[in-house]
Image (cartoon, rainbow, N blue to C red):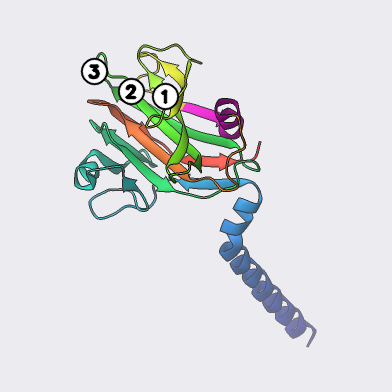
Amino acid sequence: MRRAGLRLRHVAGAVILGAFGLVCWFSAPVSVQSAGLLVVDDYSAKESDGFPTGWKAQRQEAKARTQYTVQTEKGMTFLAAKGADQRVYKRMAWDPKAMPIVTWRWRVKQAPAGADPVAAVFVSLDTDLMVIPVATKYVWSQTKDVGTMTQGGLFDASEIVLQKGTKGFGEWVEQRVNAYEDFKRIHRHEPAAQAWGISLLGGPGVEVDFGPIMVMAP
């Protein structure tokens, strides 16, 4: 009887642990975001033609689907842009004040001389009166010095140069920016309570890969 009771308790404990694990598995996305981390995309989902699920083209979507494709290399999934010269974007809401940090990796494989920008990541934290996204454009440039800031206009985003020239070509380069503080410094007001989303750009004739994009608390 005693051994039967022990076996019964072991079975009950396993059931409880299994149920707890099932609850944790289903609640994981909620706990990750509540902990101050949100994955904008790790490119684990793609359409039948390789275009990343949940993304849209700024224009000419049929062409964008041939220019931006999800690829895998050594177990890492990324978005490869080839000769694009047009943006793709993903709507993703988050609290930019609570999670101001945006991180990503990018790798420039090749870029024609004079192609500028080589690549860019647009972080849109607000929209204007015409509901057009207000973005900060983080740039890999061939000509502008790192740290250069260019004020945007009616149709251009304000940009900040993070990388210059060919140094780092062929290698994965990590980037980490405080998009909230950059927005306030450039636009001189608080962004919206919820961000608009992220856009990516490969320059004309450029081959560049974009790794996972995340936003997080400081």
Element marked by disc 2:
loop
Image side of residue 12 versus residue 152, left or right: right
Residue in the image at 42% along x and 30% along y: 157
166, 20: nearer the viewer: 166
Is the residue marked by circle 3 packed among few (<14), some (14-19), or many (20+) residues within 10 Å? Answer: few
Q: Amino acid at mark 2?
A: Val
Question: What segment is highlighted magenta in the picture?
Answer: 174-187
From the image, which quarter does the C terminus lie in?
A: top right
Identify the residue position indicated by label 3 in the image: 112
Considering every residue shown, the one lying at the far bottom of the view is 1
Q: Residue at x 32, y 52 (%)?
A: 46
The quadrant in which residue 89 appears is top left
Residue 72 colored magenta? Answer: no
Is 14 above or below relative to 179? below
Contact between marks 3 and 1 (CB within 8 A): the answer is no
**Mark before the other along the chain sequence, 3 or 1:** 3
Which is nearer the N-term, disc 3 or disc 2?
3
**SS at circle 1:** strand
Furthest-front residue in view? 129
How far is the residue under mark 1 from the one under mark 2? 7 Å
Position above or below: 108 against 25: above
- Read off the residue under disc 2: 118
In the image shown, does 69 or 196 lie closer to the viewer? 196
Vertical order, 133 against 46 (above or below): above
Q: Is residue 141 left or right of residue 21?
A: left
Magenta highlight: main SS: helix
Q: CA distance from mark 3 to mark 1?
A: 16 Å
Q: Position of residue 153 (x, y in %)?
A: 42, 27
Q: Which amino acid type corresponds to the residue marked 3 in the rendered image? A: Pro
* Residues tagged 3 and 2 counted as in contact (Cβ below 8 A): no
